[in-house]
Each structure stands twice: as structure tokens, then as C-alpha cells.
Amino acid sequence: MVALAREFGTPLYIFDETTLRAKCQEFRHEFGSRYSHSLVIYACKAFFQRTLARLLDEEGLGLDVVSAGELALARAADFPLDRVYFHGNNKSAQELEMASAWGVGRVVVDNFYELALLQEIAQRRKKVQDILLRLTPGIDPHTHQFITTGTVDSKFGFPGEQWEKALSLALASPALNLLGFHFHLGSSIYEMEPYQKALDVVLAFAEDMRRRHGFKIRELSTGGGFAITYTRDRPTPAIAAYAQAITSSLLGNLHGMEPPRLILEPGRAIVGQAGVALYQVGARKDIPGVRSYVSLDGGMADNIRPALYGARYEAVVANRMDAQGVERVTLAGKFCESGDILIQDIDLPPLKPGDLIAIPASGAYAPAMASNYNASLRPAFIMVSQGQARLIQRRETFDDLMAREVS
């Protein structure tokens, strides 16, 4: 870490290629060994750029994209677009035109407006588009309200009373090929029960539609949401536990239907623990009897998760891993918000200016949601493999900051 900070500066996001590949392989093995007709697709919203896209392709994964930008990055990396699933609650006509023209494998339809819009685009282009319907199963995954998506009160997906109407409209369209259903309950789900309950509900609906409309489900996506360990006091289930719960529930609820292809959408669980954020210590403020603030050279502009929904992390002093002594401090960011706190009340060796703070499990969402708040420059990203580091995205410059201005 010291050598990397010297070469690339801080703040810095460091991704480990071995961890990335191992997580891809673990997901494929744990689900594939229990349910051979499965496909793992990476949720790009967690973090995405072209080097990562090529690695995911090499590991045999598909992609879950939610914007034209993510789709463009995938295409620029020569990722096979037939393994791309296009999500989103408000896809524009331009985005759907792009998906149709570029041959995106599946469009996950979120609402009636999109269903009609996609049908019109596919008809005009004389194509038949494969689709899934995103269903909201009304299941509470017991996670933070900002990252819950499967409850009734959600902007995503068709609510239960609209499922049959959406299916009927999709089946009636010669320009759409309905393959099955998708649901996503939320992020950082620690329990198996929400997945099992959702599968009960969705597969019962699939069986009902088979009897009433002759519809045969061929694909079923259970989304993602697999938690990772951010802090020592809250370990997460193994991927094998998720795989066992989901595949056994699927096989146990088929009601005589032919087993559909199972789609999994991990994002955080692949890239989260592969990433480490590295900062340098600067100013310090000690308030006797209250708190000691130690400020870092990054913060909410490169990692908004703690300010946005109370995310918690661990940290180490990277340049003094064998340092003795412990003091309780709060690691603060440098940005002009009182809420710019990366870690509140953590026990670390005594800190001084120039020390390096490494925060593990930072690979998901932190770099993806980075901004130029306070006209700051977004950090560099590097990939480490077999003792070698290479730059995969350079640090922004002041010229980058002003490049879009027209006056």
C-alpha cells in the first residue's frame, strides 16, 4: 500500500484481480453445481469499466446494465451483448432504440409505459425482442429502506395486481418474446427467508399463468442482494448458503413445470471485497471529552455510502500495521458537509499526518457513486495482479473538470 500510494497518489482505489476472478468462479460453481441451468450476470451498477468488463467476459458471466452508459461501456469492451440484461425503471426511447439496434439479449420490462414503448420500437425495427417482466413480490428483505426494492411501496416493477395484465399484453405482442420473470428484493440481504418467500409467490404465479394462459416460464431471475462482510461484528452467509436456499426453493416450487433457466445478479458480492480505498491522514481536531476528528484526503465525494445510508467500515493504518497502542477517533472526509464522516468511533493506533488509512471492502458503489462535489477530482483506480499494479482509470485533472463547459 505504501508503494502504491507513492506511485499513484491518494485517494486511490485498488482492485485485486485474483479476488475478482475467485468470486466469479465461486458464484458459478456454487449455483451451477446445484442447478446446472443457471447463468451469473454481474450487476454493473456496483462498479463498472472496460477492464472489468473484459475480465467478466473471460470468467463467463453476463451483465446486468441499467443505463445507456453502462451499455456503451460493455460494447466498447467488446462484451457479447447477447449476455446483457437491460434493467431500469425509466428507460428512455433512445436507450431502448440503442438496445434494439445493438442486439441486447434481454430487456427487463419494468412498467406498462415501457412495455408499449418497446413493442413499438421492436415492430418498427422488424425485430422480436426477448423480455422478462420485473415483478414486485411484496417481500421485505429486512435491509435499509434506501436499498430495498422488492416491497409493495417501490418505484421498481409491476405490483402484484398488475402481473397478469402485463403478462397478457406481452403475450399478445408479436414483437415481444416473453421468457419469464425477474425480481430483486434489495441489497445487503443477510437472510435466506426473503428469497424463499419471493420464489414461493412468483412460482405460484407462473403455475397459475401456465394453467390460465398456457405460458411456460423459461427464465427466472432472482436478482442479487447478496451481502458482504464490511465489519467484524457482522459476518455474512457464505455464497453456498444463498445458492442452497435459492436452488432448493426453486426446485421445490416448480409444481410440475419444466425447470427454467436461473439468473443470478451479484454485483457487490463480486467486486466489493476486491476493492480497497487508500487515503492519507491530514489535519486533526481533538475536542476533550467529546471526540477526536482525524481528517483524510478523500471522503463523501469518492465514498458517499456512509453519509447516504449509514454504511459502516473497518480501517487499518497501512504504513504502520505493527503499531502499538489504541485511540478512539472519527475518520472525517475533507468535504464541506458535517455528514462527511467515513468511519465514526473506530479504535486505531495513534495517527499522525502522512499516515495511510486503508479501508477494505470498498470496491462496490463507493467508486461508482463518486462525484465532483466541491470541484474535487475523482480518484484513480488500479488493478493488482501477481504482485504487479496497472492503472485502469487515471485520476481526473482540472482540465477534465472543465472539459464540458462551453463558455
Image (cartoon, rainbow, N blue to C red):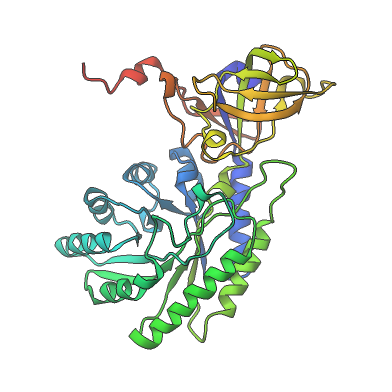
Which of the 4 quarters of the picture holds residue 340?
top right
Q: Position of residue 69 (x, y in %)?
A: 34, 41
Q: Residue at x 44, y 78 (%)?
A: 205
Asked whether 49 or 293 is in front, the reply is: 293
Q: Position of residue 385 (x, y in %)?
A: 61, 35
Q: Residue at x 53, y 32 (%)?
A: 303
Which of the 4 quarters of the picture holds residue 216?
bottom left
- Left or right, 141 with reference to 293: left
Which of the 4 quarters of the picture holds residue 19?
top right
Name the residue furthest left.
Answer: 124
Q: Residue at x 84, y 21 (%)?
A: 325
Q: Residue at x 70, y 15 (%)?
A: 287
Q: Position of residue 175 (x, y in %)?
A: 22, 69
- Left or right, 243 with reference to 96: right
Q: Position of residue 384 (x, y in %)?
A: 60, 33
Asked whether 177 or 187 is in front, the reply is: 187
